[in-house]
Image (cartoon, rainbow, N blue to C red):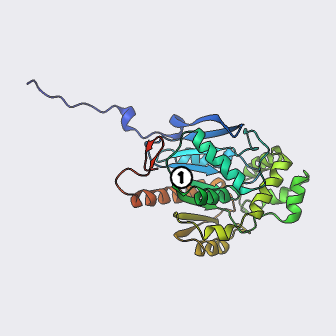
Amino acid sequence: MGPVYPVAKSRRTSRRPNAADTLTAGSVQVLGESVYYRASGSPEEGPTILCLHESGGASATWQAQLEGLAGGARCLVPDLPGHGQSEGRGHVEISEYRRAVLASLDALAIRWPVVIAGVCLGAAIAVDLALHAPERVTGLVLAGIVEGGRASSDCRSAAGQGEATEEFVTGLFGDGASRRLLKERLQRWRLTSPIVRFGDLEAVHRYPLVRMLRLLTVPVLLVAGAEDPIATPAATATLAAETAGARVVTLPGAGCLSMLEQPASFNGAVAGFLHELRLALPIAPGIPLQGGYRRF
């Protein structure tokens, strides 16, 4: 037998991917409408995390997570129906958004359990999906949530009539938010149809958040912005007390949209949560679902 020579590993296979390597975008047909999404990371690098944006927002809210979490997770960020580049007129019930998100996962052939991160509207959808399809969800990251939503009845009415609601949008940020962030978020709000904006705010207002949180059985990370005047750290801690297995992390220098204002801190908190979830999973492959076995 001749000599055996070691096989050198290629640099490409040994290097962890970054967002530039894996950032993709596309659209799928969901309930007769085109839904746009962006994604990053490799399914082989870690869990799949689905990120859901706020009322009147779009997938751009999660840009820093697409870039910052790609090395250890597969990130999927859709524009909800009626938002961004997705078709549709939006919804006035969280259950309707939940059905659309679940259909989006099916259209993308993601049939293994995922972690869902949501802010405001997206957080309510995440809770509802975890309750109605628990086999599809392995953990939740919830930011900027409060019972009854953040918008007053006057604000909801003004949003539906296309009147100025800039105070609501600026109230999503902490005092130190850059003018660029405020400008971009106001522009996105104005580009969203008043009908969709009204539906979003109504859906969150109607959702019985506390009652639903009490029913959750998956691990939950609640993220509070230290400068959020509505979903304050104290209010978020109260929600955590109503939620089995929940814990709170407070991010200084941020309001509701902490993933935009303090992306590094937000990503660090999420990465730690994902690591805890992985340690808690059994060594054997996870739940058998159509399409094969997968831990996440």
Q: Residue at x 68, y 45 (%)?
A: 60
Residue found farthest to the left: 1
Say whether residue 154 is left or right of residue 276. right
Say whether residue 57 is left or right of residue 294. right
- Where residue 215 appears, x then y in whole percent? 59, 68
- Where residue 94 appears, x then y in whole percent? 71, 56
Q: Residue at x 77, y 63 (%)?
A: 205
Label 1 environment density (alpha carbons within 10 Å; few <14, some 14–19, many ≥20): many
Is residue 80 placed above or below 130 in the rendered structure? above
Q: Quadrant of residue 264?
A: bottom right
Say whether residue 285 is left or right of residue 129. left
- Where residue 121 appears, x then y in whole percent? 71, 57
- Element at badge 1? helix
Q: Residue at x 61, y 61 (%)?
A: 142
- Where residue 161 appears, x then y in whole percent? 91, 52
Does residue 271 appear in the picture of this structure?
yes
As rendered, which of 278 and 9 lies closer to the eye?
278
Q: Quadrant of residue 233?
A: bottom right
Residue found farthest to the top: 2
Question: Residue under circle 1?
Answer: 136
As rendered, which of 78 and 72 lies closer to the eye?
78
Amino acid identity at mark 1: Arg
For the N terminus, which image quadrant?
A: top left
Does residue 119 appear in the picture of this structure?
no
